[in-house]
Image (spheres, rainbow, N blue to C red):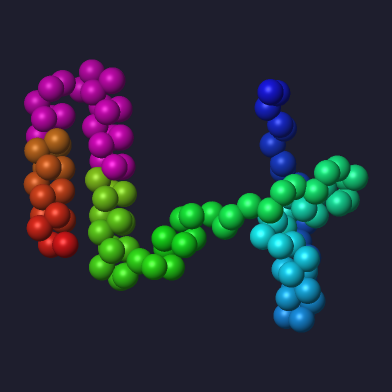
């Protein structure tokens, strides 16, 4: 399947709350952008899709869980930096030191939860 070109042109629409309620009902769980694009270009309107799961997860997260996720993201970022340093030949000792530091932080987060 050929890759679609990047969509670089953005346009916005403004609705009143009442207008948006009507539009949302007509969308019936379809993606707004994909549906509008299909209507304007004469293409087939896409099938309804479920909402993106990450939206559901974010709404249900407590403040403590959100903080933990952020800390884990920082650890993931550090791991990427360590992998990059390793691939560039920075040496084993700095990499091992960084990994030990990350392990300590991960254990601290796990024990705090």
Q: Is-magenta flag for residue 80?
A: yes
Q: Quadrant of the N terminus?
A: top right
Q: Is-magenta flag for residue 12?
A: no
Classify residue 37 as left or right of residue 94.
Answer: right
Report the front residue among 106 and 93: 106
Report x, y in % for residue 36. 80, 54
Q: Quadrant of the C terminus?
A: bottom left
From the image, give the main secondary structure of the stretch colored magenta: helix
Report the front residue among 75 and 63: 63
Q: Is residue 10 visible?
A: no
Report the front residue among 7 and 39: 39
- Residue sitting at x 78%, y 66%: 26
Classify residue 60 as left or right of residue 107.
Answer: right
Classify residue 37 as left or right of residue 103.
Answer: right
Report x, y in % for residue 103. 12, 42
- Residue sitting at x 30%, y 27%: 84
Report x, y in % for residue 68. 25, 59
Whether residue 82 is situated above or below residue 55 in the rendered picture: above
Report the front residue among 110 and 99: 110
Residue extent of the magenta highlight = 76-97
Whether residue 21 is situated above or below residue 91 in the rendered picture: below
Report x, y in % for residue 44. 83, 44
Q: Is residue 75 visible?
A: yes
- Residue sitting at x 28%, y 20%: 87
């Amino acid at each position: 399947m050929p890759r679609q070109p990047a969509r670089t042109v953005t346009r916005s629409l403004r609705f009143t709350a009442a207008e948006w309620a009507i539009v949302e009902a007509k969308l019936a769980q379809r993606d707004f952008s994909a549906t509008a694009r299909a209507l304007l270009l004469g293409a087939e309107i896409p099938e309804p899709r479920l909402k993106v799961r990450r939206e559901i997860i974010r709404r249900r997260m407590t403040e403590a869980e959100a903080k933990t996720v952020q800390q884990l993201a920082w650890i993931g970022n550090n791991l990427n930096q360590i992998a990059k340093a390793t691939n560039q030949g920075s040496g084993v000792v700095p990499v091992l030191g960084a990994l030990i530091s990350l392990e300590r932080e991960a254990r601290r987060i796990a024990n705090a939860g």
